[in-house]
Amino acid sequence: MANKNKASLGIIFLTIFIDLMGFGILIPILPTFASKELGISDFGIGSIVAVFSLMQFIFNPMMGKLSDKIGRRPVILVTQLMTAFSYLIFAFSNSFLLLFLSRMLAGLGGSNIGVAQAYIADITTKEERAKGMGVIGAAFGLGFVFGPVIGAILAKFGYHIAGIGSAFFTLSAFTFAFFRLPESLKEKKSDDKFKIRLFDFAFAKQILTNPSISFLIILLFLIIFSIANIFGIFALLGYKFYHFTDQQNGMLFGIVGLVGAIVQAGFIRSLSQKLSDKTIVLIGIFFMTVGLTLIPYGGNFTGVAIAISIMAVGSGVLQPIIPSMISKYSPENQQGAVLGFSQSISAFARVLGPLWGGFSYDMFGYQYPFLTGAFFTLITFIISFFMLKSDKIKTVDNV
């Protein structure tokens, strides 16, 4: 990889890391703020959480296509400003509507992950792409490690201070990107018929007619759904059944972020050099299945920490490698559009996952969100084993 591209990779890492740190600040305090300070019901809190991913589901493809047309840099910069503004609204929210609006705008601003992935695709070769996508995953992981810790500290001085702190970090990322982040798109897509659509069903149909891409997007959906299953109820499991403190629950979330960052920053490169993509996918799914199965039976903090670390290894492997494969099989002039669409489907999984997780937790028992996730990952393992070994989908070995 050329030195210029290495520098750009480092800049996009820092940009996303600082941005995600701002996002991570609000993760542990948003439900508490909504409940204690604004008196919002549990259902209302659920809708506030869900609308963030819903906005990403709607706008990710549009942002990706827009970046193919006008470039990655302007889309990344504008969405960062949207995100910073959403945090300022959060800081001064005094009603359900304002808080709901802030999360809608945050979801819109967060609809730039596909654009960031397309940026990586622009500056890496197909052989280096898995490593490049791991940079985004590492930035996510580290953002989720440091963000919640900073959020817990700032919240002691008031929830509005935490919101202002998030805005500060995001504006810092914007400023850094404005001065240091170069445009990565060499040839912008020339299309006089380009139109902004909230969800382009014709384009979605076009993507899904490609068996390689459609299989990988479905695979990504099931993986994200399995992870999202547990997000809403993991803290409840620790609090009600293991009697963990808030600090212990926070440490477990930190472990997930740290393990994921280590895997994505270090091991992905080594794995991608020694193993085929299809083998790495199977390894990742196996670890996720084992980890999800073990979490509700950990017994104590150490046991749960080990189980969730196993799951984090699997998700840490899968989250960069599957977008990398999608990118490899996508037309060069549609990287942003295809990766944006895949992120939209991922966001939809993050809407459905918590809904099923909460429902199964209440109706069937605390084990079921985890076992549901393990069941779906086991199914994806079996399907992937046969699909990735057959001629039904192209892999890196036979492109």
Image (cartoon, rainbow, N blue to C red):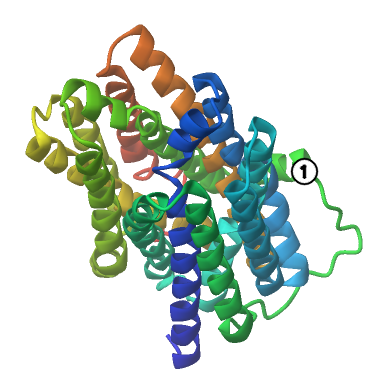
Identify which residue, 94 or 149, lies in the foreground.
94
At a point 27% along the width and 51% down the height, the residue shown is 254
Q: Residues within 10 Å of mark 1 (few under 14, many from 20)?
A: some
- Left or right of 346? Residue 66 is right
At a point 60% along the width and 44% down the height, the residue shown is 344
Q: Which residue is mark 1?
A: 198
Task: Give the percent coordinates (x, y) of residue 79.
Answer: 66, 61
The local secondary structure at tag 1 comes to: loop
- Left or right of 197? Residue 33 is left
Q: Residue furthest front?
A: 157
Q: How many marks?
A: 1
- Left or right of 250? Residue 1 is right
Identify which residue, 91 or 230, lies in the foreground.
91
Q: Residue furthest right?
A: 192
Q: Amino acid at mark 1?
A: Leu
At a point 32% along the width and 55% down the height, the residue shown is 149
Task: Give the percent coordinates (x, y) of residue 227.
Answer: 37, 36
In this rendering, the answer to whether 383 lies above or below 176 is above
Residue 375 placement: quadrant: top left
In this rendering, the answer to whether 31 lies above or below 118 is above
In this rendering, the answer to whether 42 lies above or below 182 is above
Do we see residue 331 in this rendering?
A: no
Q: Quadrant of the N terminus?
A: bottom left
Identify which residue, 161 or 342, lies in the foreground.
161
Do we see residue 87 in this rendering?
A: yes
Residue 310 placement: quadrant: top left
Residue 81 placement: quadrant: bottom right
Task: Give the percent coordinates (x, y) of residue 217.
Answer: 52, 43
Task: Give the percent coordinates (x, y) of residue 54.
Answer: 62, 36
- Left or right of 215? Residue 287 is left
Identify which residue, 206 or 63, lies in the foreground.
63
